[in-house]
Amino acid sequence: MPRSPRSRRWPGPATALPAALMAASVQASMPGPALALTPEALVRTLEQRRCERCQLQDADLVQADLREARLRGAQLQRANLSGARLDGADLRGANLSHTSLVGASLRGADLRGSLLIGTDLRDCDLSEAQLDAAALNRSHWQQARGVTTGSQGYAELHNAGVHAAQAGRHAEAERWFSGAIQQLPNAAISWVARGMSRAEQGQFSLAAQDLRYAGRLYGAMGDQEQAKALDQAATLLVAPNARSKGGNGLGSQLLGGAMAAFKVIAPLAAKAMLPAPL
C-alpha cells in the first residue's frame, strides 16, 4: 500500500522508529503537523509550551515550567508533573489518569473535559482552575488548595470532612461537611458530622442546631430513638455551665453537659466520622 503524503513528511531517520511508535506518532499529530516522538522533538515542543494531542505518557516533567502551555488533548497518563508550574495551561480534554501533580501549581488552568482518574493532586494549587462538575470524584485531591465544592460529589465532600476531622482540622472539616449538605440536604449523618465539628470548635449553639435538624431527619425516617438522642444532645450542648472555663472542643476540653452530649450520641458520631460509600 503506498505511503500517504503525510507519512513522507516525517523529519529525521523515521525508519529507525519502531512501527508501533510511528503509528502512535501519526495518530497523535493529526490533524496538525506530525511530531516525531524522539526526546529531541519532545524537548523542543515543550520548550515552546505547545504540545496539543501529543503522546507524553510516563514523561518525567518534575518541576517543569509549563505556564500558559497549550496541552489540549495531550496524553499524559502516568506522567510525573510533581511541582510543575501549569498556571493558565490549556489542558482541555487531556488524559491525566494516574498522573502525579503533587505540589503542582494549576492556578487558572483549564481542565474541562480532562480525565482525572487516579490523578494525584495532593497539595497542588487549583485556585480559579476550570473543572467539570464532579471532575475530582476519582482523583486524590486531599489538601489541594482552591478546590470548590462543585467539583466533587456528596461522598467525596463528606469523606474530605472525615479526613480533616480525624486530623484535627475541625474548621476545614466543617466546610467540607457544609458542602456535602449542599449536595445532599437530607443526609442526616453529615448534619451530625458538621455538628460535631462545630462543637469541637466551641460553636455550641450552631452545633446544637445541626444536631436538632439531624434529629428531625432521623425522625422523618422513622428512627425515633436516634431522633430523641440527638435532641437530648443538642439540649445538653447549650445547657448552662456545659462548657469548661476557657475551653473549646470535645473530649478532655469539655466538662459537664457538653461531655454528656457527646456520650449520648457517641455511636452516631462514630458513624458520622466514617467514610461515605463512593
Image: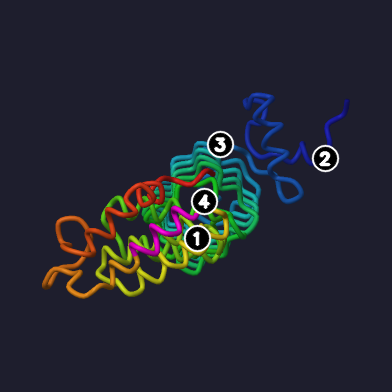
Judging depth in this view, the residue of 117 and 166 nearest the camera is 166
**Cβ–Cβ under 8 Å for marks 1 and 2:** no
Residue under label 1: 180
Mark 4 or mark 3: name the one nearer the start of the chain: 3
Residue 118 location (% of width, % of height) = 51, 41
For label 1, the SS is helix
**Cβ–Cβ under 8 Å for marks 4 and 3:** no
- What is the magenta range? 224-233
Q: Amino acid under label 4? A: Ala
Residue under label 3: 38
Mark 2 or 3: in front is 3
Say which quadrant the N terminus sits in. top right
Q: Is residue 197 above or below residue 20?
A: below
Looking at the image, residue 132 sits to the left or right of residue 202; the answer is right
Residue under label 4: 155
**Cβ–Cβ under 8 Å for marks 4 and 2:** no
Report if residue 68 is visible in the image.
Answer: no
Q: Amino acid under label 3? A: Thr
Residue 5: assigned label? 2
